[in-house]
Amino acid sequence: MIRRRRRKDPPVEMQMGPMIDMVFLLLVFFMVSARPIKQESDINLGLPGAVPQDEAVEIPDEQRIEIQPNGTVVLNEQPMGAPEDLQLPQLVAHLDRFKKSADAAKASALVTLAPDDVVPHQRVVDVLNACAKANITGVTFADSIQPE
């Protein structure tokens, strides 16, 4: 019996050169055919702002701050700060709005302090610091003599 010898086929080799060329061709094709992303166009909006007035507008020209004997701060008969509140953020916010409206109306922002006689000086300084944070420079003290 004759045996046939099987020939061993040589191992299949992958040619890397043409494969790399194809990868680069595909990369260039996709880069050229891809469109850049369009950015959305902005919509111009006109927001309301503060317009300077030509003439002075009637606004309350003075804010009255009272400091009660227990240390409570009262602005125009509305409590603004507890005795333990040293920063007085609510008072600063109100005074800041008052200053901005006075500036828009071309008026001077005036504040009158009326501390009670037994109030510690530190509490008065706290209120003065709140006025300074709101950029109010027109601060006066009320006369402590009460009419009889």
Image (cartoon, rainbow, N blue to C red):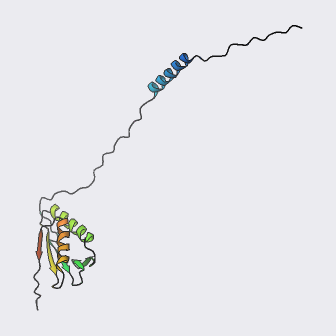
Residue 75 x %, y %: 22, 76
Report the side of 79 relative to 17 (left or right): left
Count the marks: how many?
0
The residue at the far bottom in this view is 148
114 is within the stretch colored magenta: no
Name the main secondary structure of what is drawn in magenta.
loop
* Quarter the C terminus occupies: bottom left
Identify whether 14 is placed above or below 86: above
Q: Observer-nearest residue: 147 or 124?
A: 124
40 is within the stretch colored magenta: yes
Q: Quadrant location of residue 65?
A: bottom left
* Quarter the N terminus occupies: top right
Task: Look at 52% across and 22% down and name the residue there.
Answer: 23
Residue 101 x %, y %: 19, 64
Q: Observer-nearest residue: 11 or 51?
A: 11
Residue 51 x %, y %: 19, 56
Q: Quadrant location of residue 78?
A: bottom left
Task: Look at 24% across and 71% down and name the residue there.
Answer: 91
The residue at the far top in this view is 2
Residue 43 x %, y %: 33, 45
Magenta segment range?
36-41
